[in-house]
Image (tube, rainbow, N blue to C red):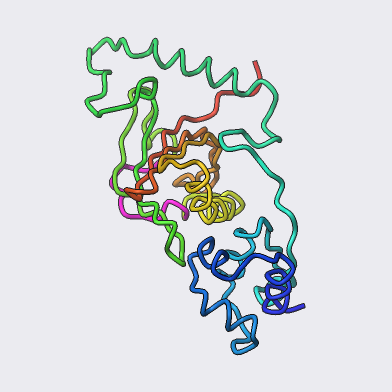
Amino acid sequence: MDSYSKTVELIKSSRVRQTELARRTGLTPTAINRWLNGRVTSIRPSNVEAVATALGKQVIWKNNGRSECEFRDVPEIATGEFDQDIAKGLLDRIIELERKIEYSKDSPIGDSVSKIDWYVGFSGWMQLQFDLDVGREEISYPVRNIYDGTAYKWIDVLGYKKRDLLNIDLLSLLESSDRDASIQRSRELGDLYLKMKSSVIEVDRIWKFRHAEGHYVPLFCHTRANLETKMAKHWCIPLPPLTN
């Protein structure tokens, strides 16, 4: 079935009021009303995805296109938790690595302490700061600031100089499945903001970043997003080896 018909069917079966759905998606009640009344018989793929996310569904596009789709339930994952397929013991290894980073601060040249206003425990990590305006129809994360850590540097980990990362869309660096997951998660932040009664949301996750040479490198990232200032920060470190 085409995406328009499936989306209208989903909206009607949800029994969510049009004004409430408009609030959740950032669309207008008029636009939604036109879909339901058949005055408009096509819906942009981005709006199909916004409606699905607002109603707790995942869009599955069919036939390698974006005109036919189906909807599936999204399994609930608590904010801040890791994906279930992360290897057992990985978190312990990351904590162990963080302790090693703390010990590495004593540099023979006495220049290992960062002058950046790092959060406690993140001085060794690389940092990205980017715009996070989740109200836009087309989600993008323009990178505004880049900092090396005292233990890791972007040039060493991903092959990019800091100036290479300025003003690019952070999503363009992510592996496709991670990029799609990040966009979907961004659509959910507005609702999460209202539920938590806080503009600040933090989460830990492993993202696969594209290296300058083309392959992908998994980085453990702690993300802190402020939905009022529309800014976010990634603190990143490469994963420790999974074998002893």
Tell me residue 123's x, y (percent): 34, 23
Q: Would residue 112 be found to the left or right of residue 22 on screen?
A: left
Q: Magenta stretch containing residue 12, yes or no?
A: no
> Measuring 36% from the left and 41% from the top, which residue is drawn there?
128
Residue drawn at 53 percent across, 34 percent down: 204
Name the residue nearer the viewer: 80 or 68.
80
Question: Is 61 in front, or is 125?
Answer: 61
Q: Is residue 110 left or right of residue 38?
A: left
Taking 15 as reference, is 112 above or below it? above
Quadrant where the N terminus lies? bottom right
Q: Is residue 166 magenta?
A: yes
Q: Is residue 174 above or below residue 158?
A: below
The quadrant of the picture occupied by the C terminus is: top right
- What residue is drawn where x is 45% and y is 13%? 100
For residue 50, above or below residue 31: above
Count of picture labels = 0
Residue occupying the point 51% across, 79% down: 30
Residue 98 percent across, percent down from the top left? 47, 18
Q: Position of residue 7 (x, y in %)?
A: 68, 73
- What range is drawn magenta here? 159-171
36 or 19: nearer the viewer = 19
**Residue 81 occupies quadrant:** top right
Which residue lies most toward the right here? 1
Q: Is residue 165 visible?
A: no
Q: Taking 215 as reference, is 97 above or below it?
A: above
